[in-house]
Image (tube, helix red, strand yellow):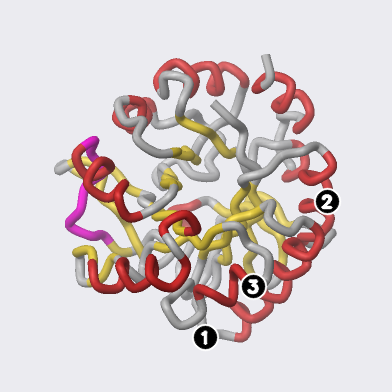
Amino acid sequence: MKFRPCIDIHDGKVKQIVGGALSDVSASETNFVSDTNAAFYAEMYRSRGLSGGHIILLNKSGTPEYEADLAEARLALDAYPGGFMIGGGVTSENAESFLDMGASHIIVTSHVFRNGLIDMDRLKNLIYLVGKDHLVLDLSCRKTSEGYMIVTDRWQNFTDISVTTETLSELSDFCDEYLIHAVDVEGKRSGIDSTLLRILGEFDNIAVTYAGGVSSFDDLRLVKELGKNHVDVTIGSSLSIFGGDMDLDEVSAFMNQ
């Protein structure tokens, strides 16, 4: 299990937002807004040798706010080239530009999950453009009576595709990694989604990063146990650098035990 750093950007600022509260209209449930720019956090991660992180652009593409997010992301990528993957508004038209900016991978959801289903033509086109080794599928999901369903468009719209070991196995031929937010607990600092982690723990074909609800070192121990020590984890709102209680260096030391 590895720790994966993160930088979430909204309205051109580094923020931590409760996942289910994000929409095109407002993001009222905000845990943290930074006074410093994304390069500050990128350098913090770089100096500690923390790689494989995620930059997520939270505004809707095509808006002035998204352009502000993009400008902030460039600062982070300039400070730590190759240290981050990037997602949010990624399409076939702009995918290569993110790699040119210094991202190691692109992260996609809404571009390939459309009308409730996966658009295999778009997915294969992305592989043609950037290569499987530079593609991460974001399978962030919310719990329903039918299981954990993948959600798109800043986690507001449900698809008809559930996160199961079968789904993970089928799609693993088309990407290098998975990023999976447990949206129902994302940003709430109220504990992890144990049921989802049990599902992820049964899959080990490619790298999987879990995000959502980590609030203590007991949670990290549980991630390690349920994820069978091969599911990586990212922490946002609970880190002290984002207004929480968990020290980044203590988290890094815990992961290296």
Residue at position x 51%, y 67% in the image: 88
Mark 1: secondary structure: loop
Q: Quadrant of residue 75?
A: bottom right
Residue beneath disc 1: 62
For discs 3 and 1, the disc positioned in front in the rendered view: 3
Instruction: Say whether residue 159 is magenta.
Output: yes
Residue at position x 17%, y 57% in the image: 160
Name the kind of residue labelled 3 in the image. Answer: Asp
53 over 113 or under it: above or below: above
Name the kind of residue labelled 1 in the image. Answer: Gly
At which x and y percent is residue 52?
61, 45
Mark 3: secondary structure: helix
Q: Residue 43: give its label.
A: 2
Mark 3–mark 1 Cα distance, whole angstroms, equals 20 Å
The residue stretch that appears in magenta: 158-165
Left or right of 24 on screen, residue 144: left
Mark 2–mark 1 Cα distance, whole angstroms, equals 28 Å
Q: Give neighbour class at mark 2: few <14, some 14-19, many 20+ (Cα, 10 Å).
A: some
Q: Kindly check if marks 2 and 1 are in contact, taking CB atoms under 8 A apart as contact.
A: no
At which x and y percent is residue 209?
48, 39
Q: Residue 100: give its label.
A: 3
Q: Is residue 30 visible?
A: no
For discs 3 and 2, the disc positioned in front in the rendered view: 3
Name the kind of residue labelled 2 in the image. Answer: Glu
Which quadrant of the rendered structure holds the C terminus? top right
57 over 255 or under it: above or below: below
